[in-house]
Image (cartoon, coloured by chain):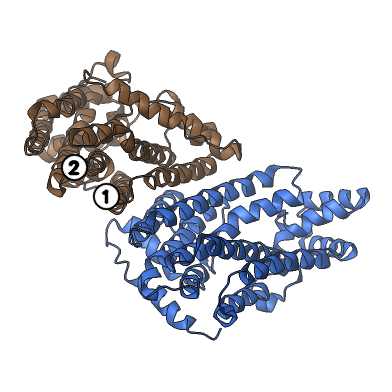
Chain colours: A blue, B brown
Amino acid sequence: MAYDTSKWQQHINQGLADLDLPPVPATLYEPIRYMLALGGKRIRPLLTLMAADLFSISDIRHAIPAALAVELFHNFSLVHDDIMDEAPLRRGKPTVHKKWNANVAILSGDNLLIMAYGQLAKCPSDKLPSILETFNAMATHVCEGQQLDMDFERSPTVGINDYLHMIQLKTSVLLGAALKIGAVLGNASDVDAQYLYDFGVNVGIAFQLQDDLLDVYGDPEQFGKQRGGDILANKKTYLLLKALETADTETVSELHDWMKRSDQPQIKINRVTAIYNSLGIQQATETMKRFYATQAYAALDRIPCEKSRKLPLQTMAQHLLNRSN
Amino acid sequence: MAYDTSKWQQHINQGLADLDLPPVPATLYEPIRYMLALGGKRIRPLLTLMAADLFSISDIRHAIPAALAVELFHNFSLVHDDIMDEAPLRRGKPTVHKKWNANVAILSGDNLLIMAYGQLAKCPSDKLPSILETFNAMATHVCEGQQLDMDFERSPTVGINDYLHMIQLKTSVLLGAALKIGAVLGNASDVDAQYLYDFGVNVGIAFQLQDDLLDVYGDPEQFGKQRGGDILANKKTYLLLKALETADTETVSELHDWMKRSDQPQIKINRVTAIYNSLGIQQATETMKRFYATQAYAALDRIPCEKSRKLPLQTMAQHLLNRSN
């Protein structure tokens, strides 16, 4: 990305480095240091800074605490989700509950959430109530989304709309809130802040659909994961749910049969992919992804400021939605 | 208690009832409803209201959201601690992770914490930064205390001072913060708010020492638990640590031997209690408890307001420290 996002990245990384975590209890703070050092693209805090800059923040550094709050919250949710999903790896490294244990992961996750609020408390006091309100609503939605995701694993009847609702809560509202909080700090009007929220939420849904697509149609070399992981895990992705909704009774039975089997992984991946292909699932998902992307850009368009100023956010969205990894 | 705390209790219970939790996802909100319905004496939110009233709050109802935040935080910490401690029961009912499962308990605990911040956000905006700061510091301390408590379980060398530090973090700072936040809402000076915080922290430590005493020297009928539960669980209470610090080498060995045994529970309780008796542990603990109680009352004394106005807090402290259950 052009623009000076690299400078902002530095601000964010510096801010994380400056958190100045106490040395003890080591069992509480080591996992937090470990998690924050795993890196990642810091997209969410970057969105906060980009949103603040889109409007009229006097000094971008005033938005750093809020950006850090967003990143800390994201890490809190990763640590706790990894316990619940029994995920062994995060960014190629052992997850906190694997490297330490579940108790350590619960508590260091809790503290990451509290640290997020610690950063929010540094926001300008006149903006604090509004920022807290946006953040709290987002945080509750993320919990609801994670719970729905877990509920869906055990539910035999998950519809496409249930799924879209779930990923909106679990994944997208964080992007929306990251942007909205930045907008508030940049003195945006309520209406414009809401447009930016809508932009983020729609980008987020499109992003998740892209993620579902990459599992089956991505280039494993670039994606960095084996193709078909979601199929093997019987994950109720948009692709699977759409296939179950579109297929004839016989094919639905076959899909259900494969979901019960784990004896022939490669054949399972190939066969389910062939079913997806025969039903045009890739195209249907691409269409849905484009629908949300279009909604996102339309929301951004509605913000009455110079087009060139929106370029960084547009570029970021394109980058997220056309990624191959 | 005299005074109109019963009216305040009602305010708190009404506030909890008015939280108006959404019906879905039921797996997220049912455990929260369940937990809040388990009851309890609501001492912590009551402290917030009492502190606000001690100074000059115009309408006590303005302190209700902060009081609810304190109670929601307390419940968050109970739900997560119960997972970590593998506790089967809470107030005689199955704990959330037993009634549902650990994942449900993690996530509904998370949401209780977020809901606490949702209430804080309703505090008057001019007081919000200060209240958030106090609350966040407390919340982090509580996490640190819980982590230390877990660390101590596995540590062979826990000293009396380590223990006092741990219970201050895990238990007492919440009482201190509940009071301090009330004081801030009541327009107390910084100095007076700090005195009230010190009062709460010292009451909290004395309270925990009382808890340790009750396990061994309480009347099981009144205490509602079997005597000696801490001894059977090899819990590093003030009593045990003091005994290990005071006893001669031979008795220390005997205590360590008993800590490794679980074959003769009643004999273990009797013998460890006899050792405590021979070492004067009950008196030593009572002395320590009185020390903290005295510190607490001294802090309260320093607040320059009419003595009679402090009576409710004094009565509450006496009630907490002389309880037999």
- Disc 1 crowd, CA 10 A, few/some/many (<14, 14-19, 20+): many
Identify which residue is drawn at 69% across, 69% down: A226
Expressed as whole percent of the image width and height from the top left, the position of residue A233 reads 70, 56
**Mark drawn on residue B197:** 2
Q: Is residue B276 left or right of residue A75?
A: left
Disc 1 marks which residue? B134
Expressed as whole percent of the image width and height from the top left, the position of residue A183 reads 48, 66
Identify which residue is drawn at 25% across, 21% down: B4
Q: Earlier in the sequence, mark 2 or mark 1?
A: 1
Say which quarter of the image contains residue B29.
top right
Q: Are marks 2 and 1 on the same chain?
A: yes
Judge by depth and name the residue closer to the eye, B210 or A69: A69
Q: Disc 2: which chain?
A: B
Q: Quadrant of the N terminus of chain B?
A: top left
Tell me if residue B262 can be seen: yes
> Label 1 is placed on what type of residue?
Thr
